[in-house]
Amino acid sequence: MEITRDTVAVITGGASGMGRSTALALARSGASVAIADLNEARIAETVAELEALGVGALGVRCDVSRPEDIANLRDRTVERFGRVDILMNNAGILPLGSISAMPLAEFERAMRVNFLAVVCGVQTFLPDLAARGQAHIVNTASMAGTFAYEPDSVAYNASKAAVISLTENLALGLAPQGIGVTCLVPGGVATNIMEQVKVSGEIGDLASYVGAHFVMRTADEVGEMVVAAIRDNTFFLPTNPELVALLARRAADPDGFVHEMQDWFAAHQPA
Ligand code: NAD
């Protein structure tokens, strides 16, 4: 879809990392942006950065795990801008711990923030997006949802796999309403995500497979990629395009691939 000075975007987790960078990239294209986040200091900083670019900016304190907060975000955005064209469900947390160490409550938290909040975001904003005739949804998943390489973040990985399935289904289901859908699939990206990590039990050397095989991206690079994907209606948006070849290899031999990953993981455990 075209991004113009009339375009209005809403981004959860918009005060930091990839959400903030996407907000700024959209603003450079002329869009007004509402950012939702828990971090009020960073909301204020990002709103000031957006305003400095000469666009409309709104910051809303919002816990995406609370449906009433998402409803408030929708109401505040429509009250201020009158419409919503782009929704980016991006807020996320990284609970760490193995299957034996992580309490069920941590799995529930991961699913509530990383997955159910995406469902709630889509359900809440769908009438506004559908009313535009042309709109776009971006859901932030993770490379960790596409194949298993880090069993010490099993709850996170499963929550992101759920986001990928949901998002692919939305791409089919919402196209008739003129709503394009992008699944952002970051590998390693330099952001503030490690600030709010909660660890259950002992964990090994985190995500070393991704670090060893994929280039680390900056959040600003990702922000530009997201804006291009919205313009071009790209569905699958890995921040490391080589991921596609790896997934093709996995699809060709799923059994052999898992054995290969088991061997790699065993060889890279701390002594
Ligand atoms: P970040 O921590 O810099 O930004 C995430 C923002 O989400 C923060 O500002 C945080 O306050 C906010 N947030 C967290 N919980 C929230 C809640 N309940 N309600 C509202 N806001 C909340 O991290 P980031 O890396 O930019 O993360 C963005 C997304 O990218 C996340 O979904 C994350 O899982 C995903 N991701 C990140 C990486 C990476 O390497 N950084 C890799 C794959 C996927």
Image (cartoon, rainbow, N blue to C red):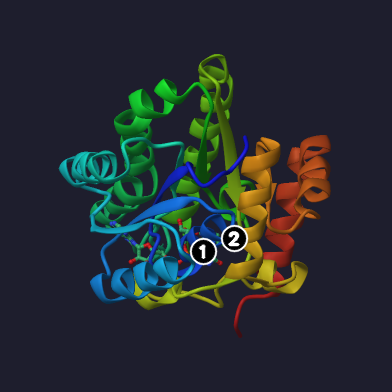
Q: Quadrant of the N terminus?
A: top right
Q: Are marks 2 and 1 in contact (CB under 8 Å)?
A: yes
The picture places residue 221, in percent across and down from the top left corner, at 66, 66
> For residue 156, which quarter of the picture?
bottom left
The picture places residue 225, in percent across and down from the top left corner, at 67, 55
Q: Residue tagged by mark 1?
A: 24
What kind of residue is marked 2? Gly
Residue at the outermost bottom position: 271
Q: Residue at x 68, y 68 (%)?
A: 209
Vertical order, 178 against 239 (above or below):
above
Q: Decide which of 118, 256 is in the foreground and name it.
A: 118
> For residue 213, which quarter of the picture?
bottom right
Mark 1 is surrounded, within 10 Å at the Cα level, by few (under 14), some (14 to 19) or many (20 or more) other residues, namely: many
C-alpha gap between disc 2 and disc 1: 8 Å
Mark 2 is surrounded, within 10 Å at the Cα level, by few (under 14), some (14 to 19) or many (20 or more) other residues, namely: many
Residue at the outermost top position: 176
Circle 1: element type:
helix
The picture places residue 267, in percent across and down from the top left corner, at 71, 73
In primary-sequence order, the first of circles 2 and 1 is 1
Q: Residue at x 36, y 72 (%)?
A: 48
Q: Residue tagged by mark 2?
A: 223
Circle 2: element type:
helix
Pointer 2 residue Cβ closer than 8 Å to ligand 1: no
Q: Is residue 136 visible?
A: yes
Vertical order, 216 against 75 (above or below):
below
Q: Decide which of 67, 195 is in the foreground and name it.
A: 67
